[in-house]
Amino acid sequence: MNRRLKITLITLLIILLSIISFVGLFVQDTKLMKNLLPEYQLGMDLGGYRTVTLKVSNAKETIYYDADGNQVSAEVEDGTSEEVPVNSEEVVTAENFQKTKQIIEDRLSDLNASEYLIRLNESDGTVTVQIPEDDMASALSQFIYTVGKLTIEDENGQVLLDNTNLDDIQIGYETQSNGTEVYLNLNFKADVKEKVKEISNTYVSGTDEEGNTTSKNISMKLDGNTIAQKTFDREITNGIIRIELGTSSSVNTINAYLNQASNIAVLVNSGNLPITYTVNQKYVKSDLTLDDAFIPAIVMGVILVIAFLFLLIKYRKLGLLAIISYVGYMAVLLIVIRFTNLVITMEGICGILISAILNYILLIYILQTLVKKEKNLAEYKSAYYEAMLSMLFIIVPTLIIGIVMCFATWLPIYSFGTIIFWGVLMIAIYNAIVTRILFLNSIKEK
């Protein structure tokens, strides 16, 4: 292929990538334009956060009794009632305060929350949780305050089994003739296996005297809300009750069932909150505003213009190609950050700046190495590879540092490390392919 044509095609590709990265890739979605690129995932220091506050409830509830003193769900004739606290003195303990904090932390961890901060006031049991204000905020907040009490009840609402009888819940799916069935396996403890066996022999399908099909159902409820009902067709001896959530051949519907199953498993496996709370939520904006970023952005813009002018004046044609390559690198890096869902914090922005500076230094080093050679294609190739190999002494250690930081549990360090990792990796790959094509094809072979 003609050398000028190669440079032109690479340049057009870089322009296209730059437009997509810096502006977006929009398509018509009903009446709105939708950007196909994922949104940037901002940390709480940049995107703001939602504060969920759980305070121990001082409310009271009314308990109703019938004439014989048995507890009933509503007021009855000749019955009695009493007002009792929703949280008894035996419940409001320091141990349960810590248990609540641990349960919330387990849930957020199991849901792969990108960032969260949990504080406990040990004197009054108030729990304060901060999560990023993003698309996941509303869903995550529900997992913070949902009690998560699972019960297996009969048709009259009598509780047969509950969380305390469970070992864990496992998610499963199975291909059927009419689609994919999503289900939950409730694994009960060994000491209630006989109870499970008894339930499976009691709540079964049958026929009455007239030959009509009859059935006795159990219901699986989460915080009093019915999730599914079941009638047994065989005896259960292993202590595992399989609850079918639904069957479908639609991918979207199957994913919805799997998401529901995952949510239930997370809530129940983490345990139910031991205390009743009142919940308050509020959105807190980031301390950083556009006004705060205005002056740094202007300064960085001026520095970038000066850096580009330096390349143009000193290296001319190669300098222009270096500018084109540099813009393309930044476009590719930002696209990678979007699609890998890297969380950007202030430390992450520092990682982007360091990557940009390292890439500029590499371009300068390559250009300096090239201009020392005669205008001979073979010598240019040798000089280019020599420059890339020399820069490996900087790239490899930085890459290793980034990998190590990727294992950090503190988000600011993790954000910096992951961005440094991808930034340096893209420097090596991008300059070994794109920049090399631009530079070497600008040389006329003698």
Image (spheres, grey):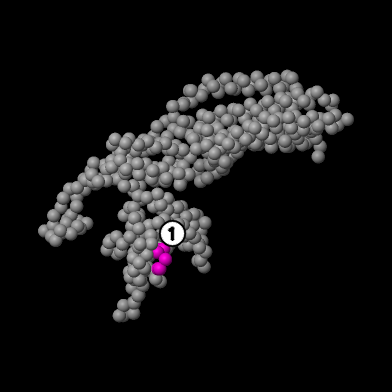
Instruction: Give the SS element for disc 1.
Output: strand
Looking at the image, residue 367 lies above or below residue 418: above
Please report the residue visible at 35 percent of the width from the left and 49 percent of the height from the top.
272
Percent x, y of residue 247: 47, 62
Looking at the image, residue 131 lies above or below residue 370: below
Residue 418 at least partly seen: no
Indicate whether residue 412 is drawn in magenta: no
Check the picture and name the quadrant holding the N terminus.
top right
Percent x, y of residue 406: 56, 37
Left or right: 88 as drawn, with respect to 263: left
Q: Nearer the viewer, residue 440 or 31?
A: 440
Q: Quadrant of residue 436?
A: top right
Dominant SS of magenta comes to loop
Q: Which residue is mark 1?
A: 184
Left or right: 211 as drawn, with respect to 174: left
Please report the residue visible at 35 percent of the width from the left and 41 percent of the height from the top.
98
Please report the residue visible at 45 percent of the width from the left and 57 percent of the height from the top.
170
Left or right: 74 as drawn, with respect to 164: left
Identity of the amino acid at label 1? Leu
Percent x, y of residue 172: 48, 59
Range of the magenta residues? 236-241
Q: Quadrant of residue 128?
A: top left
Percent x, y of residue 205: 36, 72
Q: Nearer the viewer, residue 153 or 271?
A: 271
Residue 127 at least partly seen: yes
